[in-house]
Amino acid sequence: MLSRPPLIAVRFSAGRPLAAILGGLLLGLSPLAAQAAPPEPVADAGADCGPYRVGLREYPQLYQRQGDGRHEGLDREFFEQLTARSGCRFSFQLESQPRIWQHLRSGSLDLASWVVPSAERQVLVHMIPLLTARPMAVTWRERGPMSQADFLADTQLKAVAIRQALYGPGYDTLLQRLREQGRLSEVADFETALRAFAAHRGDLLIAFPWSLAGQPWAWLEQLRFSDWHAGAGSLYSTLALSRSTVRPADLRRIERALRVMQQDGSLAQLVARYLPPEGVQVLPAGTPLPPLPASAPARAAPAPAPAPASR
C-alpha cells in the first residue's frame, strides 16, 4: 500500500545510482543541510504589502499534510522567509493545479510557487526564476528497458499525468501526442496520479525522483527511472505573481527580497533541506527566463513542479 512520503532532509554524493538515491530518501540517513542565517529585512516593514493569496498544491517535500492536519514543507518555509525579508503578508489556499490557474485568471489568487514557465502563462503572471530541476520517466521494470520511441510504438501503453502540468518541451510534446491518441489519463494532483499508476492504470508517470520518497522499497524496486531527454536543459521553476492583482511596488519589493535570499545563500540552504542537489540547481539572482515556445501545449498545460520542479 502506498504511504505518504515523510518530510526529510537529505544530501547525496554525485554519481550515485538512482536506486541508492531512493534508498537514502527512504532511510533518511543523510545529514541535515546547514540552517540559514536569521533573515535581515530588505524593505520597509511599515509599508503595507498584502495580504496576497498564494495558491499551493499538495506535493511531496513541497507542501505535505501531516497527521495532525497541518501542512509542512519547502513552500511553508519559503514564504515564511519571504515574509521576513520583504515585510509582505501572504495567505495560503490549497488548490488543484487546474484551479490555481483558473483563480489566477479570474483574479481570486495572486501568487503560485514553483511554476514552470510558458508563453501562455507569461501573459497572466510575472515569473521570477528560482531553480531548475529534471523530471524523469517512470515505467514498470517488468516491461524491460524502454525509450520514448518504444513507448510511443506500443499503442497498448498509457500514461497518467497531472492536468495542466508542464514537464518541459520534450515530455510535454510526448504527452500531447498521447492525449491525441487517447492514451493519456489526466488527474487533478500528484497523489491521485500516483495511486492510478500504482494500480497499473498507467504505464508511464513523469515525476521528480524525490516525489516517491517514503514509498515501500519493494514497490520502488518494480520501477524503472529513465531520463528520456538527457540532452535537454533542466526545467525552470519560478515564483509566479499575477500581473493584474500584485501592485508594481510590491512586485519590486518581493523581487528585492528574493535577490537577497539568492545572493546570501539562504534560498539554497532552504532548498537543500527538502530536495536532493542531484538534478536540482538554485539559480543566481537575476537569471532571465529561457526562450519560451509560442504557446503552451493544448490541455483538456507552476507546475513543480517541484512538482519541482515542474511544480
Image: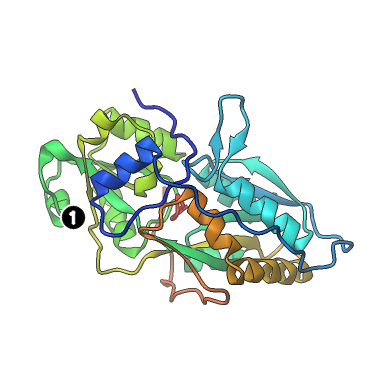
Q: Is residue 22 left or right of residue 249?
A: left
Residue drawn at x 24%, y 29% is 218
Instruction: Name which quarter of the figure residue 71 lies in.
Output: top right
Q: Percent x, y for residue 161?
A: 36, 44
Residue nearest the viewer, comparing 67 with 135: 67
Residue drawn at x 62%, y 46% is 76
Q: Amino acid at mark 1?
A: Gln
Q: Percent x, y for residue 231?
A: 25, 69
Q: Which residue is mark 1?
A: 148
Residue drawn at x 22%, y 58% is 228
Work out whether residue 303 can be spotted.
no
Q: Is residue 41 left or right of residue 146?
A: right
Query: Is 146 rendered above or below residue 281?
Result: above
Query: Is 123 rendered above or below residue 84?
Result: below
Q: Is residue 41 left or right of residue 298?
A: right
Work out whether residue 290 can be spotted.
yes
Query: Is 290 rendered above or below residue 204?
Result: below
